[in-house]
């Protein structure tokens, strides 16, 4: 399967074109990376409006550093993920005193609604379990398993080693399993955890 993402040099070239005054280059970079940054922020923050703010702030910071960008220092995508990750963690720290309660919607009486309710319940349970993880564990799990970023890139985003990323992901995964295990059967995860536990 081929990677649908454009090669990194195209990003660096577009950033240089923007720095030289080409606004179309900025539009193309935003179209290319904005949705992924928004998805990361949405998963980290659990709030679409906040995710939009983080996406806009991330892209604004990219435009501000464009004239000083040094190709080869870091991939544009890695830089974007690092900035968005830091912005998300800052927001999470500022709102730490508030408890994020995710309540599933009330049941829809339509027969086909059962699947939608189950999917919403699973998503809500996962979001709540993710919210309970320490920020860096949550970020590592989201980047690895939801955004499917490779460990070396996650290490660069987090400013740590690949081994530390592997540890963060493993601990985060164990914590999620432990948090979701009591509800595994009613969430439809029973087979994932096994009948006898373990």
Image: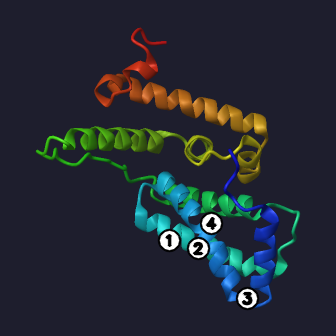
Q: Where does label 3 land, which residue?
A: 22
Q: Which mark is residue 53?
A: 1
Q: Residue furthest bottom?
A: 21
Counting residues from the start of the chain, the first of labels 3 and 4 encountered is: 3
Q: CA distance from mark 3 to mark 4?
A: 17 Å
Q: Residue furthest left?
A: 109
Q: Are marks 1 and 2 in contact (CB under 8 Å)?
A: yes
Q: Residue furthest front?
A: 1
Q: Nearer the viewer, mark 4 or mark 2?
A: 4
Counting residues from the start of the chain, the first of labels 3 and 2 encountered is: 3
Q: Where does label 2 land, which residue?
A: 57
The correct choice, above or below, for 47 with respect to 167 in the image is: below
Q: Nearer the viewer, mark 1 or mark 3?
A: 3
Q: CA distance from mark 1 to mark 2?
A: 6 Å
Give the image quarter of residue 189.
top left
At 44% from the left and 12% from the top, the residue drawn is: 197
At 66% from the left and 47% from the top, the residue drawn is: 149
Secondary element at tag 1:
helix
Q: Where does label 4 land, which residue?
A: 33
């Amino acid at each position: 399967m081929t990677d649908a993402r454009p090669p990194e040099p195209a990003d660096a070239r577009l950033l240089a074109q923007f720095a030289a005054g080409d606004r179309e280059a900025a539009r193309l970079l935003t179209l290319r990376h904005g949705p992924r940054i928004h998805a990361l922020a949405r998963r980290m923050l659990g709030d679409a409006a906040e995710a939009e703010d983080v996406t806009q702030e991330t892209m604004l910071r990219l435009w501000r550093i464009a004239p000083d960008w040094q190709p080869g220092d870091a991939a544009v995508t890695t830089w974007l993920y690092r900035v968005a990750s830091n912005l998300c963690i800052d927001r999470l720290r500022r709102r730490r005193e508030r408890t994020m309660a995710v309540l599933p919607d009330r049941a829809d009486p339509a027969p086909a609604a059962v699947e939608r309710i189950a999917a919403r319940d699973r998503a809500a349970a996962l979001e709540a379990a993710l919210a309970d993880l320490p920020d860096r564990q949550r970020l590592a799990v989201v980047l690895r398993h939801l955004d499917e970023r490779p460990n070396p890139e996650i290490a660069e985003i987090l400013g740590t080693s690949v081994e530390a990323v592997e540890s963060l992901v493993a601990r985060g995964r164990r914590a999620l399993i432990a948090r979701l295990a009591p509800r595994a059967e009613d969430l439809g995860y029973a087979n994932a955890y096994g009948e006898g536990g373990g």
